[in-house]
Amino acid sequence: MRCAEQNNHHEKTPMPCPLTDETLARIMAMAASEDCVFLETSRVTAEESLSYFFHNPVTHLACYPHDDPARFFQQAEDFLAEGLYLAGWLGYEFGYLLDPSLAKHIRLDPHKPLARLGVFRAPLIFDHLSGEPLGALWPNPPQTGTSTGYRITNLRPNLGQADYTAALARIKEYIESGDTYQVNFTLKLLFDFEGSPEALYQALRRNQSVSFGAYLRSGDQRILSFSPELFFKRSGEQCLVRPMKGTIRRGPYQAEDARLMAFLQTDAKNRSENVMIVDLLRNDLGRICTPGTVQSRSLIDIETYETLHQMTSTITGHLPRETRIESLFKAL
């Protein structure tokens, strides 16, 4: 998922105008040699039509398990007030710091950050509607040889069958005791990697076009992200969220594909789960938006990707002008 600031009219119809091979090669060459954040829109719509490349950071902001998140957010606000830009990542566990009831239970490596943001001057921007870069010219990439291949071996899940079964049993116990009503239980895939992370990114993006792709280089760390889902977007005093809930595979033939899409659109289980998430996010927005301004702009939309159909809904609300970044993250 990606946070963004844009102010374009909502439109679902893709209008492909991808980065040229030359432009992408320049970006990847620079990404191989310096800290950067590349936010790419490879699934172009009228609403999501820009890609951003941040490089040559002025400095960095980091938040560790025992840091004060309020200070982290205040530093971020101070840099924004100077006309600088922030781009980077916040880990899932960063949310623990925002809830006192959870913060006291954190048992994480104190030497590993939960969030890290680069502080940048204006990004290089590519407009996918015109097919041209905006503003500053793209710099020439460094004249150094970079690897163009990669190798993945020893692919494996992080949980064995016994641990997986035990975890499911604990989840059922939590549900039966009333501690929770739904758990998003996920696994990690571990693997050994050799070669160029930039080459892996280019290979993955060819097979999975999304509106919110990202390549981040931060010190020794690389993050390759291919998300179709927007977490939230603040445009002036408007806050928009677009949750995804409800998925079905694509069909091998046009008629079968249309049948599967229609099934997803009308399936009671998928619709109820989507509406449940909409209710939760309406409640979250209601905590920070002006009373009476939260509305469901659209319900049960279907977005089509290479391998699946995805159900989405869109909720908006009007933020008081003084709303700070910290308040947004605490609420959402």
Image (cartoon, rainbow, N blue to C red):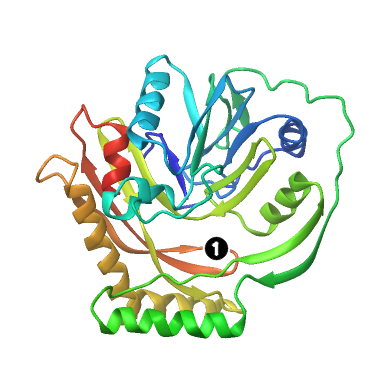
Q: Kindly tell me whether residue 108 is visible in this rendering.
A: yes
Residue 74: x and y, percent? 35, 26
Residue named by callout 1 = 305
Q: Is residue 23 left or right of residue 167?
A: right
State the residue at coordinates (48%, 40%).
Answer: 64
Q: Residue furthest right?
A: 145
Residue placed most toward the observer, 236 or 322: 322
Q: Residue furthest left?
A: 292
State the residue at coordinates (68%, 59%).
Answer: 207
Q: Is residue 97 left or right of residue 126?
A: left
Residue 150: x and y, percent? 83, 53
Residue 288: x and y, percent? 19, 42
State the residue at coordinates (57%, 78%).
Answer: 251
Q: Taking 169 as reference, is 305 above or below it?
A: above
Q: Counting other residues with Cα less than 10 Å from the Cα at mark 1, is it few (<14), some (14-19), or many (20 or more)?
A: some
Residue placed most toward the observer, 132 or 246: 246
**Residue 272 figure quarter:** bottom left
Q: Is residue 159 left or right of residue 152?
A: left
